[in-house]
Image: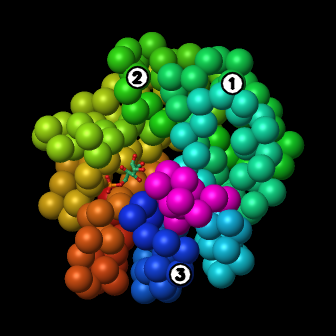
Amino acid sequence: MKLQLALDLVNIPEAIELVKEVEPYIDVVEIGTPVVINEGLKAVKEMKAAFPDLTVLADLKIMDAAGYEVSQASQAGADIITILGTAEDQSIQGAVEEAKKHNKKILVDMIAVKDIETRAKELDELGVDYICVHTGYDLQAVGKNSFEDLATIKSVVKQAQTAIAGGIKQETLPEVIKHQPDLIIVGGGITSKEDKQTVAREMKELIQLG
Ligand SMILES: O=C([C@H](O)CO)[C@H](O)[C@H](O)COP(=O)(O)O
């Protein structure tokens, strides 16, 4: 199980400063969708330049023109690029093919997918690298989480790795670990804390205990 830090509500210098604090404890750094919207792929480029050994995920949440978007993000230095599970199969295939050309990986975000089980099976067959269940900010606000969806995808996926995102905190981490996803994505659970380094270290230690 790996730990991904999601950076959503920061600018580029703040993102780099934050990663400096927690780098030893994270496996992947995510340039979140709001950062990409505000700053563009420059944010991915600058993060990769600052931390060449860290895996960088560009949370583009692609819905169309997937091959082109994946190509652009790959050239900016992203190692993993996200596409939405609700996108057309044609788009998913385009993303997977383009990512292979650049030796990059595709993570499918299952936010707003209604039939998680069926779609996860289809995506797995389309050859994506990760399938990620995700409770977005707007559903977190009404008390939802993705633990059940994680169990669902774990039971049907054969080749892809599994991931979970959305409101995960130190207190809910043990419940996540029980389901053994390959990737655990944490944003506010670390970035909103005063002592980010301690929280990231303690979360990483818990993950390593498995
Ligand atoms: O993908 C995300 C969200 O849609 C905003 O872009 C977040 O990165 C993801 O939810 C993880 O952040 P937290 O929910 O704060 O842990």
- Look at the picture and state if 192 lies above or below 84: below
Q: Which residue is mark 1?
A: 91
- Look at the picture and state if 95 lies above or below 93: below
- Look at the picture and state if 173 lies above or below 182: below
* Residue 5 x, y percent position in the rendering: 43, 65
Image quadrant occupied by the N terminus: bottom left
Instruction: Tell me the residue at 52%/65% (across/down).
Output: 29
* Residue 109 x, y percent position in the rendering: 48, 36
Whether residue 30 appears in this view of the structure is no
Q: Quadrant of residue 152?
A: top left
Quick check: 55 left or right of 52?
left
Instruction: Tell me the residue at 47%/55% (across/down).
Output: 34
* Residue 202 x, y percent position in the rendering: 28, 76
Q: Which residue is mark 2?
A: 113
- Look at the picture and state if 180 lies above or below 84: below
Q: Which residue is mark 3?
A: 13
* Residue 132 x, y percent position in the rendering: 45, 39
Whether residue 204 appears in this view of the structure is yes
Q: Secondary structure at mark 1?
A: helix
Q: Are marks 1 and 3 in contact (CB under 8 Å)?
A: no
Instruction: Tell me the residue at 21%/43% (across/down).
Output: 140
Three-letter residue code for mark 2:
Val
Q: Nearer the viewer, residue 148 or 72?
A: 72
Which scheme is used to colour this image of the protein?
A: rainbow
Q: Quadrant of residue 48?
A: bottom right
| Residue placed furthest toward the front | 38
Q: What's drawn in magenta, residue-wise?
A: 29-41
- The mark that comes first in sequence, 1 or 3, is 3
- The mark that comes first in sequence, 3 or 2, is 3
Q: Is residue 31 magenta?
A: yes
- The mark that comes first in sequence, 2 or 1, is 1
Q: Is mark 1 within 8 Å of ligand 1?
A: no
